[in-house]
């Protein structure tokens, strides 16, 4: 769970979030039992998995890290996160037995995801939340590895802001970026004369706008972009929060179908917030395999923090945890993504003592989780932010978390 403030002129909004599960077919249960017997897990156990490069022996890609652009000033930093609350009382804290963990290999039943992950020259697709090419290049230089994806956010005040967004307006804003775009869009404008609502969306009122959005991506030569459609819907901080589950799922289905009508190559990311507290069960809001390509999980080191490998595994497999999301993706033959993740400071943040601070253990464990599940990882993107009152996750420019920054630069 958490918060973010978009690239939309306003700085930061308060966030939070939650979820549950659905039963899987008997065949998947058998697969789950087999994996359990073999002792396979999604999360790292604190030891090297053999194929995970963790610790002093890890190496980085030697490819060039600079991307092409015009060097313009661009927009200010992307999003903010602050004002979180802890898990709601009385909610389950363990992953359901129906979520079958798997540390590698093919998805359950041998089926493969129907879309491709982001292209990469490294062990798995990796990127950064950024508003300009300059920032993306700085991140690449910091870690010594090219940026494969940029996670960006449209403005949210009108359909024109969403359809004809700043993303791709010029080279500094990623028109010539050689990697993949991850476009974060609301389900409808959240302010101004065109402010929308779930019920109208559920009735298909915005279908023409979403068809125009898909056509605009194609016109920019970015039809295969990942689209985070109505991200963090299981929180209470966005206008598209799933306060009415029936309307929300119908809204998502309409938007997804309309985008695909004009952009059949688009990759739709159904993106929930880990360990949220808004009383909304993310997995009860799954719109169906026909409308989703990627299972996205935003997961930060808070509520609870990961002090060691055991506590990381516990929260990862806990309510709305990253590992539960990965298991869900495998069961549904989907890719998974982590569009936002990062350390969280204990000072000047809403989490306070519920955050891990400068925590290289968390960085290491996230790397291992990505490495061990890279066969279905669409992309991961670090949230590098130093905004006052936000999460203070920044590892570079400025380096607010030196131990975590060293660990990240070494591993990536």
Image: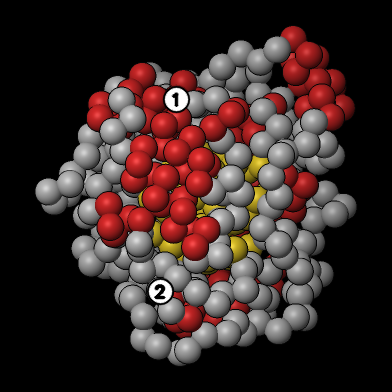
* Element marked by disc 1: helix
Q: Residue at x 80, y 20 (%)?
A: 31
Picture layout, residue 50 above or below residue 253: below
Identity of the residue furthest to the top in this view? 26
Horizontal and vertical percent position of residue 369: 68, 48
Q: Residue 377 at what x, y percent from top left? A: 68, 49
User: Callout 1: few (<14), some (14-19), or many (20+) C-alpha neighbours within 10 Å?
Assistant: many
* Residue lying at the far left of the rendered structure: 193
Does residue 332 appear in this view?
A: yes
Dot label at residue 10: none
Question: Toward the viewer: 287 or 37?
Answer: 287
Q: Does 316 appear above or below 137?
A: above
Q: Which residue is mark 1?
A: 285
Q: Position of residue 246 (x, y in %)?
A: 36, 19
Q: Secondary structure at mark 2?
A: loop
Density class for disc 2 (Cα within 10 Å; few <14, some 14-19, many ≥20) is few
**Mark 2 vs mark 1: which is more N-terminal?**
2
Left or right side of 200 for 165: right
Q: How many marks?
A: 2
Mark 2 in CB contact with mark 1 (< 8 angstroms): no
Per the image, the residue denoted by label 2 is 169
The foreground one among 212 and 360 is: 212
């Amino acid at each position: 769970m958490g918060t973010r403030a978009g690239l939309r002129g306003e700085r930061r909004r308060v966030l939070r979030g939650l979820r549950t599960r659905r039963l899987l077919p008997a065949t998947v249960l058998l697969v789950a039992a087999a994996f359990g017997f073999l002792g396979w897990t999604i999360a790292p156990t604190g030891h090297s998995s053999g194929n995970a490069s963790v610790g002093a022996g890890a190496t980085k890609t030697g490819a060039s890290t600079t991307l092409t652009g015009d060097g313009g000033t661009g927009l200010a930093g992307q999003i903010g996160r602050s004002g979180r609350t802890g898990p709601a009382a009385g909610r389950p804290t363990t992953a359901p037995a129906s979520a079958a963990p798997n540390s590698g290999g093919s998805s359950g039943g041998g089926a493969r995801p129907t879309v491709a992950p982001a292209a990469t020259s490294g062990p798995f697709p990796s990127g950064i939340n950024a508003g300009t090419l300059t920032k993306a290049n700085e991140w690449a230089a910091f870690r010594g590895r090219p940026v494969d994806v940029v996670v960006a956010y449209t403005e949210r005040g009108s359909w024109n802001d969403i359809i004809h967004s700043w993303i791709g307006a010029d080279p500094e804003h990623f028109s010539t970026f050689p990697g993949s775009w991850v476009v974060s869009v609301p389900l409808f404008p959240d302010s101004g004369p065109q402010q929308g609502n779930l019920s109208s969306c559920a009735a298909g009122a915005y279908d023409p706008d979403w068809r125009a959005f898909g056509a605009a991506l194609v016109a920019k030569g970015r039809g295969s972009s990942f689209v985070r459609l109505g991200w963090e819907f299981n929180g209470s901080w966005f206008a598209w929060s799933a306060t009415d589950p029936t309307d929300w799922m119908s809204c998502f289905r309409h938007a997804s179908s309309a985008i695909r009508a004009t952009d059949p190559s688009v990759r739709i990311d159904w993106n929930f917030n880990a360990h949220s507290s808004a009383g909304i069960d993310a997995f009860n809001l799954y719109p169906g395999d026909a409308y989703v390509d990627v299972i996205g999980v935003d997961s930060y080191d808070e509520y609870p923090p990961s002090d060691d490998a055991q506590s990381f595994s516990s929260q990862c497999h806990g309510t709305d945890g990253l590992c539960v999301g990965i298991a869900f993706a495998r069961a549904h033959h989907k890719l998974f993504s982590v569009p936002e993740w990062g350390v969280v400071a204990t000072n000047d943040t809403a989490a306070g003592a519920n955050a891990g601070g400068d925590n290289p253990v968390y960085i290491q464990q996230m790397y291992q989780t990505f490495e061990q599940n890279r066969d279905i990882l669409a992309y991961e993107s670090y949230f590098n932010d130093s905004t006052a009152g936000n999460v203070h996750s920044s590892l570079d420019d400025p380096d607010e978390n030196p131990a975590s920054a060293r660990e990240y630069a070494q591993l990536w």
